Image (spheres, rainbow, N blue to C red):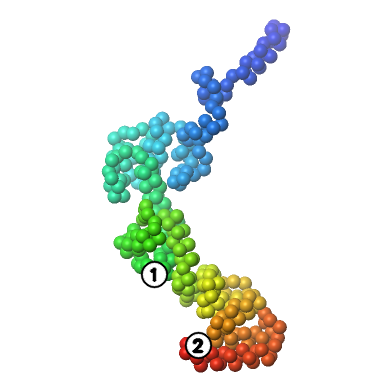
Amino acid sequence: MPTVRRTLIPILAALALALPTGAAAQDGAPAPSASEREAEPGAETGRGADGGDTDTQQRDWPGDPLVAQIQQGLMDLGYDLSVVDGLMGPNTRTAIQAFQQDQGMTVTGEATDAVKRAIAREKFQRTQEAERLWRKARLYLRALGYRPGDGAFDSDRAQAALQRFANDHWLQLETTFNARLADVIKRAAGADQLAQQRLCGHHLDADRYQEAFEWCQRAARNEDRRAQYIVGWMYYYGNGVARDYAAAFKWYRKAALRGDPRAMTFLGLMYRQGKGVARNPDRAIAWYERAVEARKQPGGQ
């Protein structure tokens, strides 16, 4: 008996090495290659492009994975579905129709990628993150001269403002509001000098110094005299940014050379005290005198 066992062991080991692995091996079919495995439904990892849950995408559904993802999304939104199985039954069709009707879509009851994307957008719009992004975007729209009102992004005024923004920037408004559109609106405000000035003043008036510094500095870099003075003031007192007398002097000087009398006064003070620059009483007096003369000019402050 020991002799037979010793003979069988290497034979069984060789057979085991020759067998294919995975689910396909059970049918006697060759194991899929790495590229084939990547192409199979459910092979994705992480979140899908539409923000779908990994769990839903990877699970082995008895039916169509797209139908299963739509079923899960509709359940998350509160539609009358009690099972996620990937099978297209009358309850699933009715729920899709109800969703399409609520969204103003063409009512077909069919499980499509367009329905899946619309569900993902609706789920996003119901999150706290969407509310936070809309508050920011609403402020940027105001700074750009649009009038979104004070309501949510699905209000009539907000919809009208978003549509005007989309038209002005050659955008197709695929949905009422999403993270991509919020980013486009912010970048538009960041590239608009008047919007920069308005946002600088808005945050400054509300004592939100860190946010004010971001927008004031953008305006200052675009040679806005008032913003240059404000950035110098923020550096001088350490409001919204770490106190830095050298940086304060630089921005005060920029504003002063553009005729801002307040910046001239601060330059005189800094030369007199030796803050951010070598102490120089003569230059201090010269800047004080220039400040007095500048205040006499039309528009002097």
Q: Residues within 10 Å of mark 2 (few under 14, many from 20)?
A: few
Give the residue at mark 1: 145
Cα distance, mark 2 to mark 1? 27 Å
* Mark before the other along the chain sequence, 2 or 1: 1
- Name the amino acid, label 1: Gly
Is any atom of residue 230 visible in this view? no
Whole-percent x, y for residue 59 in the image: 47, 35
- Name the amino acid, label 2: Gln
Whole-percent x, y for residue 180 in the image: 45, 55
Q: In what element is the residue under mark 1?
A: loop
- Residue 80: quadrant of the picture: top left
- Residue 88: quadrant of the picture: top left
Q: In what element is the residue under mark 2?
A: loop
Q: Is residue 280 left or right of residue 21?
A: right
Whole-percent x, y for residue 112 in the image: 36, 40
Q: Tell me if residue 209 comes above or below residue 253 in the rendering.
A: above
The residue depicted at 46 percent of the width and 58 percent of the height is 183
Give the residue at mark 2: 301
The residue depicted at 54 percent of the width and 22 percent of the height is 30
The residue depicted at 35 percent of the width and 62 percent of the height is 164
Which disc is residue 10 wearing?
none
Nearer-the-camera pick, 124 or 215: 215
Whole-percent x, y for residue 117 in the image: 39, 46
Number of numbered discs: 2
Is any atom of residue 99 visible in this view? yes
Q: Tell me if residue 264 comes above or below residue 98 in the rendering.
A: below
